[in-house]
Amino acid sequence: MTALQNQSAYQVNERGYYGQFGGAYIPEMLYPNVEELRDNYLKIIAQPDFQEEFQGLLRDYVGRPTPLYLAQRLSDKYNTTIYLKREDLCHTGAHKINNTIGQILLAKRLGKQKIVAETGAGQHGVATATVCALMGMECIVYMGEIDIQRQAPNVARMKMLGAEVRPASSGSKTLKDATNEAMRHWINNPTDTHYIIGSVVGPHPYPDMVARFQSVISEEIKKQLLEKTGSELPDYVIACVGGGSNAAGAFYHFLDDESVKLVAAEAGGHGITSGLSAATTFLGKIGVLHGSKSILMQTEDGQVVEPHSISAGLDYPGIGPMHAHLHDSERALFYAITDDESIASAMELSNLEGIIPALESAHALAVLPYLKATPNETIVINLSGRGDKDLATYMKYL
């Protein structure tokens, strides 16, 4: 992670765009906050004392590197070689903490005392509350009313960690609305508060900053794969995409290696044509959501369509600008995975490997039947989170 901008076709350019997507479409009142971040984030991340503290916490607090596990029985079933990147073994149970640690260290160096965040499944909320407890900072998390009901254990975790959880009761009462509320809060408290966005969405520099903090995932995959197979390049990297932070982290160091096929699993919900879906690249068109230009699900007159997914972490009506560009440039392949397919894949992994995945991650696993990979190919699936938080949903299918 250098302070120099990557001159990659797939990375952000100096104007904050990935191809035609990205930028910072923000109200004037947000401009000072975003500008302060934009001017400082690369300089701060590059400082040796920042890197030392960041790497130290990733190692000793998060438990990195996370294992790259050869899933032998799953591989046998699909007659190929499948490795799971075990982000589910991170402290707090998902990849989200890689980013919250990076951002809170940044916030401290910018002199902020308070943190605001949004959360869908609650994983990013928990990861934010966790680092706020670690650093002794005040924490407010906005969460959709529906998600608060769906993800009660994570709400309890956040409160136990000292965060205040505020319900977002407008619109669909899910992630999009929580994001709106958190942005509103930040506009009203610009000087002492840092907004920790949990995905590769929002105005520049957020998508790039979050991707950089999550890029440790693909950095480790390359090293681990080299050790295990003699090559640091797999044939496929698969990840689920809501906003897309775990996918951005898993894809990051493979973007310019065109031999590596990047595969994104979106939430198909009840099916693309059902009206209950969150498959943004299949149903969306270009527009602006939460401060950046991307692909989003919208009506003819530009109103955001309510997304649906069985997974609280994937029911987002947009997609990060990096992924919009990967889709537009055909660098990544996108699949819409239905609710039923994700449940079946979660059950399959539990039965074959003794690993209960998060519903989000189960969408990535559900791509396997579609890939038709050959026996001599290597697949890495980013297992972004563990399934504890989804037991209430899984119980309905037992």
Image (spheres, rainbow, N blue to C red):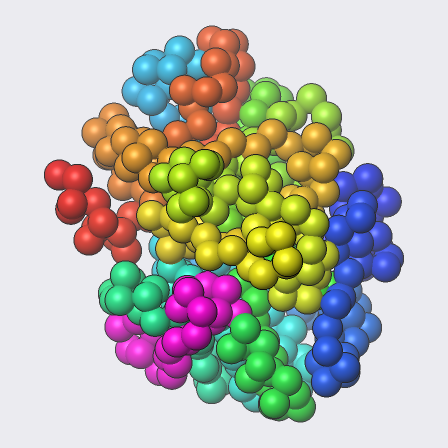
Residue 330 on the magenta span: no
Q: Quadrant of residue 233?
A: top right
Q: Report the magenta residues as a range.
A: 155-179
Residue 157 on the magenta span: yes
Q: Residue at x 56, y 25 (%)?
A: 236
Q: Residue at x 30, y 35 (%)?
A: 340
Estimate the x, y position of residue 301 in percent, counting from the top left.
64, 58
Location of residue 75 with respect to 313 vertically, above or below: above
Q: Is 360 on the left or on the right of 151, as rendered?
A: right
Q: Is 318 on the left or on the right of 252, as rendered?
A: left
Estimate the x, y position of residue 218 in percent, counting from the top left.
59, 41
Q: Is residue 238 visible?
A: no
Location of residue 91 with respect to 369 vertically, above or below: below
Q: Residue at x 62, y 25 (%)?
A: 261
Q: Is 70 on the left or on the right of 115, as rendered?
A: left
Location of residue 371 with respect to 304 vertically, above or below: above
Estimate the x, y position of residue 20 in percent, counting from the top left.
80, 48
Q: Nearer the viewer, residue 336 or 202?
A: 336
Q: Residue at x 67, y 80 (%)?
A: 109
Which quarter of the image is occupied by the C terminus? top left
Q: Is residue 190 visible?
A: yes
Location of residue 344 with respect to 211 vertically, above or below: above
Q: Quadrant of residue 331?
A: top right
